[in-house]
Image (spheres, helix red, strand yellow):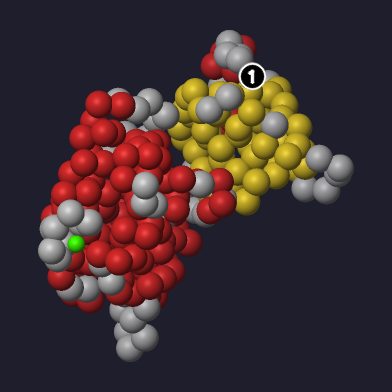
Amino acid sequence: MSLWILDPAGRDATVLREALSGETVDLRAATEIICSRTPSQLQIMKQTYYARFGTYLEHDIGHHTSGDHQKLLLVYVGIPRYEGPEVDPTIVTHDAKDLYKAGEKRLGTDEKTFIRVFTERSWAHLASVSSAYHHMYDRKLDKVIKSETSGNFEFALLTILRCAETPAKYFAKNPGQFKVYSGGLAWKRQGGGKTIEIDKADVTAVTWMKVPRAYQLGVRIKDGLFYRFIGFREQVPPLRACL
Ligand SMILES: [Ca+2]
């Protein structure tokens, strides 16, 4: 049983605002946050951004970025993407071919195709495209990105690819014990130490999904904090009744 605590949307919004305003614009930091968040995290973060700073995230992105980097970020924060684990192998092969034609096979690069594939596809899908590409063309996709693109655009594509292939690296992972009781949820770190208690009155949303080799319970609470509990072996019916 592991607990992943994701950064609250509020912290992301504040860091992003700092990176996208004032005299010290930090496009690398902004790019890293945007490209390493899930579509639902981005959705909440955009709302928080507007509520806190009275300006749209898209506006600040548009103001400080340019070219393909700008196009990619605007689409990435703007469109919904599937977050589940299922992948269609036919579309994967198709995307790998498209990326080959858009990059290695031609003189120069067709950035539009890279933007389309990297903004429209889920992380699970992109991870499959990456291994299909390696298999079909005997070259790693990150190497292709490095030779076909540059600067912040390259960094954005690489960040998305890294998150797609190893999302766990981006979050703290803690083994521990999980308990459901009448008042809410509790989690205790293995070997003592930190205990997290979530009062059921603070829970604003609960999600349940299949992830590789286990089930995942997602719990969002009032201040925007999102907990992912990973490692359930099977369905736990009493959970829904309890919450
Ligand atoms: Ca090329």
- Compared with residue 134, is residue 242 higher up or lower down, i.e. above or below? above
Image quadrant assignment for residue 180: top right
What residue occupies the far top of the structure in this picture? 237
Task: Tell me, yes or no, if residue 84 can be seen here.
Answer: yes
Q: Residue at x 18, y 44 (%)?
A: 98
- Compared with residue 120, is residue 219 higher up or lower down, i.e. above or below? above
Q: Number of numbered discs present?
A: 1
Report the residue marked by disc 1. 233
Q: Residue 65 at what x, y percent from top left?
A: 22, 73
Q: Which of 56 and 176 is in front in this view?
A: 176
Quadrant containing ligand 1 reads bottom left
Specify the quadrant that holds the N terminus: top right
Q: Residue 142 at what x, y percent from top left?
A: 38, 57
Quick one: SS at disc 1?
A: loop
Q: Is residue 9 left or right of 76 when viewed as pictured?
A: right
Image quadrant assignment for residue 159: bottom left
Q: Which residue is drawn at 58% across and 24% down?
A: 213
Q: Which amino acid does label 1 sit on?
A: Arg
Categorize mark 1 by other alpha carbons within 10 Å: few (<14), some (14-19), many (20+): few
Specify the quadrant that holds the C terminus: top right
Q: Residue at x 37, y 47 (%)?
A: 138
What residue occupies the far front of the structure in this picture? 138
What residue occupies the far bottom of the structure in this picture? 23
Q: Residue 102 at what x, y percent from top left?
A: 16, 53
Q: Nearer the viewer, residue 39 or 90?
A: 90
What residue occupies the far right of the structure in this picture? 191
Q: Residue 44 at what x, y percent from top left?
A: 36, 48
Q: Which of 9 and 35 is in front in this view?
A: 35
Image quadrant assignment for residue 10: bottom left
Q: Which residue is drawn at 22% across and 56% down?
A: 104
